[in-house]
Image (cartoon, rainbow, N blue to C red):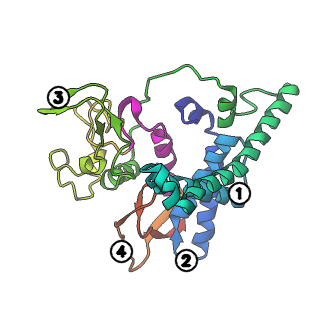
C-alpha cells in the first residue's frame, strides 16, 4: 500500500483528502474559536488510508468508528503484554483482561469483514462487466492480500526532494520529539564486536532514537530548535538524508532497508499543504507546551491549538 509507485498512482485522490481537511479547518476558522488541529489532521489521514485499503470513500461517522477501533487495538498491544509473562497463572489472575482481546477481535471482525466482502463483490462484478482496468479502478490494499500476489521487489529508494522551510520544521520537530523514543527491538544474528564491546549472538538490541537526536557530538546546541540544521546541504550539495543511506544522525522512522515504509507517505502529506491554504497564529496567551505523553507513540500531552485564517 505504501510502495512509492502505489502512493504515486493515488495522487489524484490526495486532493480529495486534503479538501476534507481544508473544509473542516475553514469551518472552524469562520467560527473564530480555537482549533484543535490534530483531530482534523487525523480524520483526513484516516479518510485517505481507509480509501486506499478498501477502495471506498466513507462518511465521517464510519471513519470515526474505524479510527477509535484502531486506536484501541494499538493501545491493546501495550496493555496485553503483561498477559505473556506467566500465561497460565495470568489467565486466573487477569481473568477479565484475558477476555478483552477476544472482545476486541470480534469488534474488529464485525467492522472490517463487511468492508472486505463488499470490495470482493465490487471487483467480481466489475470483472464480469469487463471494466477491471487499472486506470478505471485503483487497486485497493485488500485486493493485494486476497490475490496473494507480490509485486516484483524493488530496493531502490527515491531521493528526497529539496525541502522548503516547512519541511525543515517537520524534520527539526522529529529530531526533538520523535514519535517513539525507541525503535522496535532487533535480534543480533551472530556474535560481533562494536566499539570494544562484545555483542553475543541472539542479544536483543534497542536503538535509542530520542537520545540520538539530542547527541551533542552530532548536533550543535541539541536542545535548541534550529531550522538551519535542515536548510543547509551537505558537502556534496545533497539535502539531509533521513533514510540513513549516507549517514545516520537521527532515525525517527528507522534506517536503511528496514526503514518504516510509511515515512515518504507521511512527509508527502505534511509538507507545505497547511501553509499554502492558511495563515497560522498562536492563541493569545497560550504558550506551546512541549510536554510529551505516551499513547501508542509519544504525543503532545496538551495538543496545540491555533487560530486559522484562510488565505
- Residue 148 percent across, percent down from the top left: 65, 25
Q: Which residue in the structure is indicated by mark 2?
A: 33
Q: Which residue in the structure is indicated by mark 3?
A: 193
In three-dimensional space, the C-alpha distance between marks 4 and 1, rounded to whole angstroms, equals 35 Å
Which secondary structure lies at badge 4?
loop
- Asked whether residue 269 is drawn in magenta, I would say yes
Pick the front one: 198 or 294: 198
- Residue 239 percent across, percent down from the top left: 32, 37
- Among the two numbered marks 4 and 1 on one chain, the one whose residue lies closer to the N terminus: 1
Marks 3 and 1 in Cβ contact (< 8 Å): no
In three-dimensional space, the C-alpha distance between marks 3 and 1, rounded to whole angstroms, equals 52 Å
In three-dimensional space, the C-alpha distance between marks 4 and 2, rounded to whole angstroms, equals 17 Å
Which secondary structure lies at badge 2?
loop
- Among the two numbered marks 3 and 2 on one chain, the one whose residue lies closer to the N terminus: 2
Residue 47's disc number? none
Which secondary structure lies at badge 3?
strand
Range of the magenta residues?
253-275
Q: Main secondary structure of the magenta part?
A: helix
In three-dimensional space, the C-alpha distance between marks 3 and 2, rounded to whole angstroms, equals 58 Å
Amino acid at each position: 500500500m505504501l510502495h512509492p509507485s502505489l502512493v504515486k498512482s493515488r495522487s489524484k485522490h490526495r486532493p480529495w483528502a486534503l479538501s476534507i481537511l481544508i473544509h473542516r479547518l475553514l469551518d472552524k476558522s469562520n467560527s473564530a474559536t480555537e482549533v484543535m488541529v490534530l483531530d482534523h489532521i487525523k480524520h483526513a489521514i484516516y479518510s485517505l488510508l481507509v480509501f486506499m485499503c478498501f477502495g471506498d470513500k466513507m462518511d465521517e461517522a464510519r471513519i470515526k468508528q474505524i479510527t477509535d477501533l484502531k486506536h484501541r487495538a494499538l493501545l491493546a498491544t501495550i496493555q496485553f503484554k503483561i498477559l505473556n509473562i506467566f500465561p497460565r497463572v495470568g489467565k486466573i489472575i487477569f481473568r477479565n483482561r484475558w477476555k478483552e482481546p477476544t472482545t476486541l477481535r470480534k469488534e474488529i471482525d464485525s467492522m472490517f469483514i463487511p468492508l472486505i466482502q463488499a470490495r470482493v463483490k465490487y471487483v467480481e462484478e466489475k470483472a464480469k462487466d469487463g471494466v477491471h482496468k487499472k486506470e478505471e479502478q485503483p487497486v485497493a490494499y485488500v485486493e493485494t492480500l486476497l490475490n496473494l500476489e507480490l509485486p516484483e521487489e524493488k530496493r531502490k529508494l527515491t531521493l528526497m526532494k529539496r525541502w522548503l522551510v516547512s519541511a525543515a520544521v517537520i524534520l527539526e520537530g522529529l529530531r526533538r520529539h520523535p514519535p517513539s523514543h525507541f525503535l522496535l527491538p532487533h535480534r543480533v544474528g551472530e556474535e560481533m564486536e562494536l566499539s570494544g564491546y562484545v555483542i553475543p549472538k541472539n542479544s536483543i538490541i534497542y536503538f535509542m532514537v530520542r537520545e540520538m537526536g539530542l547527541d551533542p557530538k552530532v548536533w550543535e546546541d541539541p536542545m535548541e530548535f534550529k531550522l538551519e540544521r535542515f536548510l543547509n546541504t551537505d558537502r556534496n550539495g545533497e539535502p539531509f538524508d533521513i533514510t540513513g543511506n549516507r549517514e545516520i544522525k537521527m532515525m525517527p522512522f528507522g534506517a536503511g532497508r528496514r526503514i518504516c515504509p510509511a515515512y515518504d507517505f507521511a512527509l508527502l502529506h505534511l509538507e507545505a499543504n497547511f501553509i499554502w491554504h492558511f495563515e497560522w497564529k498562536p492563541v493569545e496567551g497560550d504558550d506551546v507546551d512541549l510536554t510529551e505523553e505516551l499513547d501508542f507513540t509519544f504525543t503532545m500531552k496538551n495538543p496545540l491549538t491555533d487560530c486559522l485564517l484562510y488565505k
